Amino acid sequence: MIKKLLTKDIMIEDIFVTSRNDLVAAAKLKMMRCNVGGLPVVDEGKLVGMITHRDVLLAGGEALVLKVEDLMSKDLMVAEKDTPIIEVTKIMADKGYQRIPVVDDGNLVGLITQSSLIRALAGID
């Protein structure tokens, strides 16, 4: 079953995002309030980066006054809607990624997370 799944079949479409100009403190608060470990960074719908709770922790307390673009990862591994989930799973396992953004012509359309993969394997919608 998993070999037939595509990212569009299990991706999270209701995604919490942040902007490159937001303060890191605001992004951290959003992550905490939304109970997520990372936020895609978008500019007019286009994916431009990713910031994670780990990024914020590693940067230290003084980083809270920085802008998101100062800490975000810019060189991202992404998937498209028709990418087989087995490929995404291998990338996540090999690289240790916890989330892979799904894009369509550069626009963020979804997110594959470890939790979405587990829910798919368990048959939970």
Image (cartoon, grey):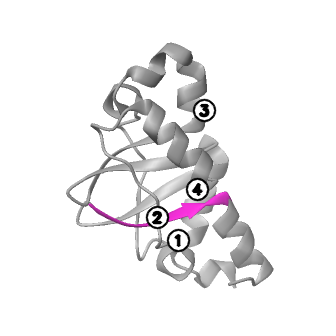
Give the distance between the C-alpha atoms of the residues marked 2 and 4, in whole angstroms.
Answer: 10 Å
In the image, farthest residue toward the right: 122
Residue for badge 2: 15
Give the distance between the C-alpha atoms of the residues marked 4 and 1, in whole angstroms.
Answer: 14 Å
Q: Earlier in the sequence, mark 1 or mark 3?
A: 1
Residue for badge 3: 54
Residue 37 visible (yes or no): no
Indicate yes or no whether the magenta region holds residue 51: no
> What residue type is disc 2 on?
Ile
Residue 21, compared with residue 36, is above or below; it is: above
* Count of all numbered marks drawn on residues in the image: 4
Q: Kindly identify the residue that appears in the image at 43 percent across and 31 percent down.
A: 24
* Left or right, 6 with reference to 3: left
Residue 20 visible (yes or no): yes
> What residue type is disc 1 on?
Ile
Can you tell which of label 4 and label 1 is closer to the viewer? 4
Rendering coords of residue 69 (x, y %): 32, 32
Find out whether the residues at labels 2 and 1 contact each other: C-beta distance under 8 Å.
yes
> What residue type is disc 4 on?
Cys
Rendering coords of residue 68 (x, y %): 37, 33
Look at the image and give the residue range highlighted in magenta: 107-114
Q: Residues within 10 Å of mark 1 (few under 14, many from 20)?
A: some
* Left or right, 71 with reference to 123: left
The circle drawn on residue 34 is: 4
Residue for badge 1: 12
Residue 123, compared with residue 26, is above or below; it is: below
Find out whether the residues at labels 3 and 2 contact each other: C-beta distance under 8 Å.
no
Q: Earlier in the sequence, mark 2 or mark 4?
A: 2
* Left or right, 8 with reference to 125: left
